[in-house]
Image: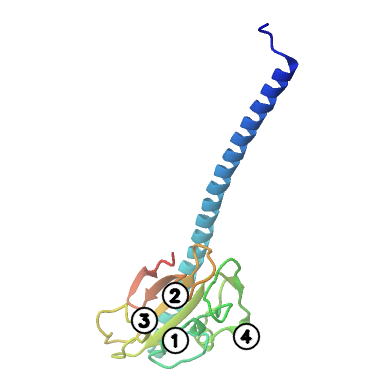
Amino acid sequence: MYGVTKRQLRSRARGTTLVELMIVVVILGILAAIATVGYKRYIGRARLSEANAMLAELSAKEQLYFMDVGAYVPARADNNLTQPSPDESASAFIPVSPTAADFESARTPHTVSTPSFPVAWSLIGLRPRWTQLYCTYLVNAGGAGQAPSGPIGSQLWATTPLVPWFYAVAACNLNTTDGGSFPDNVTLLVLTYDSPALRTLNDGH
């Protein structure tokens, strides 16, 4: 009377297996979410490392050039050597934005070939250590008493520098999200002629 039939045993077995399967699916989902977050952090750190190295090299080359010539030189993708430099725009960065509308620098690196280097990169002797760059770069410069132009330059000094100046900018997409217009979807990192400290002007998130 109180015995368990074969049908009941099979039913219980199927029920237990389904519960276990659901638990496994939940665990896999949690692990996948953790892995995704970890991957995004890894990509962000890698791109920050590139930006740190490139900005430090840009700054060092500009300082060496200044010792020889007595002036800093703008390093722009549009090859405009005017001082002070024109307003910053996506087209002034090297490598140039992969799309006309957005400044994404997103999931794939930009390949930089030697002929596409800005003229000023050759003047100051700059050669990237990598043929592909995840971030894009710009150096704007001016003479003593010349006000920095553009929204980035206007944030860097309370008053117009009374000596020749430059600032180097790296624009990086650290959260790997596509879309958005420059500079809203990118992190802007800046080094200036008068400080070795790296500043973040826009977190891009």
Amino acid residing under circle 1: Pro
| Mark 2 nearby-residue class (10 Å; few <14, some 14–19, many ≥20) | some
x, y (%) of residue 156? 32, 77
Q: Disc 4 designates what residue?
A: 115
Single out the residue that lies furthest toward the top: 1
Q: Nearer the viewer, mark 2 or mark 1?
A: 2
Q: Label 1, label 3: how many angstroms apart (C-alpha)?
A: 16 Å
Q: Disc 3 designates what residue?
A: 151
Q: Disc 1 designates what residue?
A: 74
Q: Say above or below: 84 vs 13.
A: below
Q: Label 2, label 1: how many angstroms apart (C-alpha)?
A: 20 Å
- Asked whether the beta carbons under mark 4 and mark 2 sit within 8 Å of each other, the answer is no
Is 14 on the left or on the right of 29, as rendered? right
Amino acid residing under circle 3: Pro
Amino acid residing under circle 2: Pro
Q: Nearer the viewer, mark 4 or mark 3?
A: 3
x, y (%) of residue 53? 48, 68
Instruction: Please identify the quadrant where the C terminus is shown.
Output: bottom left
Q: Disc 2 designates what residue?
A: 183
| Mark 3 nearby-residue class (10 Å; few <14, some 14–19, many ≥20) | few
Instruction: Say which label, 1 or 4, has the lower sequence index.
Output: 1
x, y (%) of residue 23? 59, 34
Instruction: Say which label, 1 or 3, has the lower sequence index.
Output: 1
Instruction: Say which label, 3 or 2, has the lower sequence index.
Output: 3
